[in-house]
Image (spheres, rainbow, N blue to C red):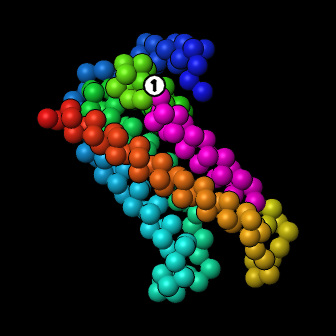
Amino acid sequence: MLDEKKINEIKKNVENFIKDGTLAKGGDGKEVKFFVNNSKNSFNSAKLLFDVSTNDELKKVTGFQDFDGFLWVINSSYYSMFYMARALLESEGITINTNESSIHFIVFNALVYYFHLTKKLEKGFIEEFRDAEIESSELLGKQKARELVEDYFFEKEKRGRFTYEMGEIAIQGKARTSLERAKRFNERIRKLLEAKND
């Protein structure tokens, strides 16, 4: 994924982000704690959703017998990684000056440029971050399309289960992978942040 062509593209992107002020160095890092807390909350949400989705007793206790939060496990896991990446960038004084939807693209490029190319972060962690982003956006898009089709063709009371058991098993596996990936990524970034503070 991070071949020479992609690396050169990222270098050009970051140079353009710096020129146009989207990325700036010299920040005070005051947002690090904010992003670390958001990461922790996102990860805890993912873990809770996974636990409730896989535990019949928890479903019963919460009153959601047919609860399936696997899609949101994947999304929350990715966001925990995204916020941790933002914390890492902030810790280096790198600020992002945009609220556009392209912020995920900018964060990925900055992560590669400032941490992979400088050998502070291994290629595998960068690729896991990218994989998490892609899975999250693909699954959310599919889910939204699926819901529109279901709403169109079925009355809400009569709507049956859309996915078959194999589909549920597959998404549960993706959710488990996302949770494990986020845990590894966040632990690695946390160690970088702690080393910086020592």
113 to the left or right of 93: right
Check disc 1 and report its element: helix, strand or loop.
helix
Q: Name the residue that disc number 1 marks.
A: 112
Location of residue 91 by image quarter: top left
Closer to us: 90 or 48: 48
Q: Position of residue 127 (x, y in %)?
A: 52, 34
Q: Which residues are magenta?
A: 123-147
Outermost residue, right direction? 153
Q: Which residue is drawn at the image coordinates 60% and 14% (left, top)?
A: 5
Mark 1, Cα crowd under 10 Å, few <14 / some 14-19 / many 20+, is: many
- Quick one: 17 or 185, which is closer to the camera? 185
Residue placed furthest toward the left: 198
Is 77 or 101 nearer to us in this picture? 77
Q: Position of residue 154 (x, y in %)?
A: 83, 73
Task: Tell me which secondary structure the magenta stretch mostly adopts.
Answer: helix
Does the magenta portion include 134?
yes
Q: Residue at x 45, y 25 (%)?
A: 112
Left or right: 40 in relation to 99: left
The residue at the point 51 percent across, 39 percent down is: 128
- Picture quarter containing residue 26? top left
Camera sees residue 98: yes
Residue 169 locus on image (x, y percent)? 67, 65
Tell me if residue 101 is in the magenta stretch: no
Q: Is residue 151 above or below residue 34?
A: below
Q: In the image, what residue occupies the spot 46% across and 13% down? A: 15
Q: Is residue 192 above or below residue 154?
A: above
